[in-house]
Image (cartoon, helix red, strand yellow):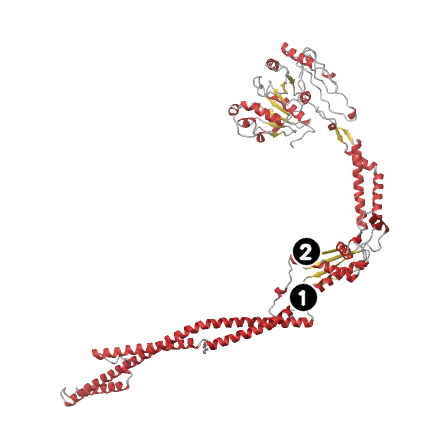
Amino acid sequence: MSVQSAAADVDVDLGQLFASLARNWLRILLAVLVVTGLAFALASLATKHYKAQTQVEIVPRESVYTRPAGSNNDGDKPILDEQGVATQVQIISSNEILKQVAQKLGLSRLHEFDETINMSAMSRVLILLGLKTDPMDVPADERVLKKMREKLNVYGVEKTRIIAIEFSSEDPKLAASVPDAIAAAYIAGQGAAKRESNSAAADFLAPEIADLSKQVKDAEAKVAAYRAQSDLLIGGNNSVLATQQLAELTTELSRVRANRAAAEGTADNVRKALQNGGSLDSLPEVLSSDLIQRLRERQVELRANIADMSTTLLDNHPRIRAAKSQLADLDAQIRSEAQKIMRGLVMQADAAKARESQLVADVNTLKAASAQAGEQQVDLDALQRDAAAKRQQLELYLTNYREAASRQDRNYVPVDARVVSAASVPSEPYFPKIGPIVGAAAAASLLLAAVFTLLRELFSGRAMRPARRVRLEPIDEVPMPPAAYEEPLIRPEPAVASAFANRDAEAPWPDTATDPQPLPSAEAEVEPTEQAEPAAMPEYASEPEPVAVPRPRSVLGEIDIEKAAEKLIASGAARAIFVSPEGDEAAASAVLVAREVSDAGLRVLLLDLTASGAASRPMLDSGLFPGITNLLASQSQFSDVIHADLYSDCHVIPVGTADPVLAMRAADRLPIIMQSLTTAYDLVVVECGPADAQGISRLGGETTEVFLSMLEPDDEVTQAAVKLIESGYPDLTLVTPLGHEPPGTPVPGRRSAA
């Protein structure tokens, strides 16, 4: 059995707990009816409040026909972002507008907004006693504004350009009148602000226009005077006359130079043709002469006659000789005419050269004049720009002034806001809502009454019952021959019997938790199994429980798992060392004892030092976890090698996966590791397997208990016990796992890995 506190031996009887609701239904119903009736009465007697809402849209109201010239639709739009709407909300709820509405509707004469009117006697008494602030200390306007703000709610409708104005009042008509009046005051205020701005603009533009008119006149006079002073005459192309003349002379100079070059080239060609005796027919200037053309025709005619006469006459014939003489004269005349043409071309080239020289001189003169005119033109352009800018500004001011004056005369200033939904007189109050209030009161009172009933039943103890304990049939039963009930199976050696007899005489160990009896000595005989009857528990007289038949005790005086756990808890031991001479099967004692102590509420860790991992494998369902060998080999840290038991709250350090030879080289670190584990846990259980006294010497310390796990009381167990006692462990305790579930089986009431 587990060692638990008395408070942990009781459970909550849920059936008994919730049955208290049925037993106390009348009380619960009465409480609900009382609370519901009070809520209904308070809601019915409460002052009714009505709420109305007016919606104002922020939108441009300017028409396309009246929009000022030069403006566009986008420039006239108001600020429609979130900050702009929030600004308009603050303007609507400003003190100025609220004061106008309060004065217009006469709210200061109503008791709802000024509690000094018709003040009750109770309030006067409280004021005299100093329990209430005298409202007369606050100015009347501030009292009215304070009440209006408490009843007013102005907010922008999400994702729209609409501002909602909500107002609540005891009078439904007043609840509708106030938001409409606030909206009207807001729109009127915006219009007044626009008219004021328009009037200010007109007043500003009038003197500015007069000043600009004078400035424009002076600027244009300066332009004309400077133009006359600098002789900057304007030509046909709207340019200075000197610059225009320079351009024309430059064009003429280019033409004259071209003619001169052409005349000189033609004269050179004619001269070369005359000097070399070449043909003059290829020269266009010679061919263009009418005289030369006629001489050429006569020359052709004579050559034809000479050819005709040569057919009948000899070369010395007078007629042929006369014709040849005429032909020579014609050649001489043609050359003479060509020389004349050449001289004419030379004279033409000389004239063009002279004209070129004259034009070059004129161009140089105009260049200087044009440069001076350019400098003067810069100053003139500056004066013209100044005059043009002032005239443009004057024209703009004149246009704006005419528009502002016309709007002022006609009193036309559209406001960028309009009422899209006027407030209507509410027919039903928004507070109090009798139905929801009564329903909420009924639900809350029912819940509180039920909770109060359950808590009272729970704290009275009537809903508590003793915790149920389940005894399981043992899985492994050791068959005993009939003779075992009459004589001991094994006679231990005198040293073992003496050790156990002395230990039992000094500190007898109880057989059960409720009826302590001394353990039998080594010479005592074991009572038959049939005489061991479990004590009946009154709490479970109506529920039969499975009873495990206890195993007959041997002469060695071993104890079971529960007794071993109780001994560890009672002694406050920090370490429990288990030696299993019979091998892996006996290592179950360490696992079962560790779980039993963990179930009692202590922090327990099991350290597996067996070679095969017989103790940790049933707790982890695997032998591949890092463990003590990894820690000794410096391959892992404490957080890596400590694992949770799958079937209890116990922790376990398995054997590990490192090389055992490498790990044993650091076996001197075991005392340090044990000290660290003892500091962190209430109890450290070490399963050493078939170890001897020298093997477990490094694991001991203060408040250490040594246990010898056994399955059969044979010679091997007896010899191991004798050696341990002789080696300095006289308080050796024998424990057996027989009669308990195997370590890998989950026990009811413990945490299951599933």
**Residue 159 in picture, x, y percent from top left:** 66, 57
Residue 242 screen position, x and y as percent: 42, 76
Estimate the x, y position of residue 721 in percent, counting from the top left: 61, 15
Q: Is residue 35 left or right of residue 255?
A: right
Q: Does 343 appear above or below 660?
A: below
Quadrant in the rendering for residue 744: top right
Q: Tell me the kind of residue under disc 1.
A: Lys
Element type at marker 1? helix
Give the number of the mark in front: 2 or 1.
1
Instruction: Tell whether 311 sits left or right of 414.
Output: left
Q: Would you say 119 lies left or right of 256 here?
A: right
Instruction: Give the image quarter of residue 753.
Output: top right
Report if residue 404 is visible in the image: yes
The amino acid type of the residue labelled 2 equals: Glu
Q: Quadrant of residue 94?
A: bottom right
Answer with left or right where residue 227 lies relative to residue 564.
left
Instruction: Give the camera-side residue of 230 and 590.
Output: 230
**Residue at 66% over, 69% down:** 199
Whether residue 493 is visible here, answered yes or no, is: no
Q: Which mark is residue 158?
A: 2
Q: Nearer the viewer, residue 393 or 681?
A: 393
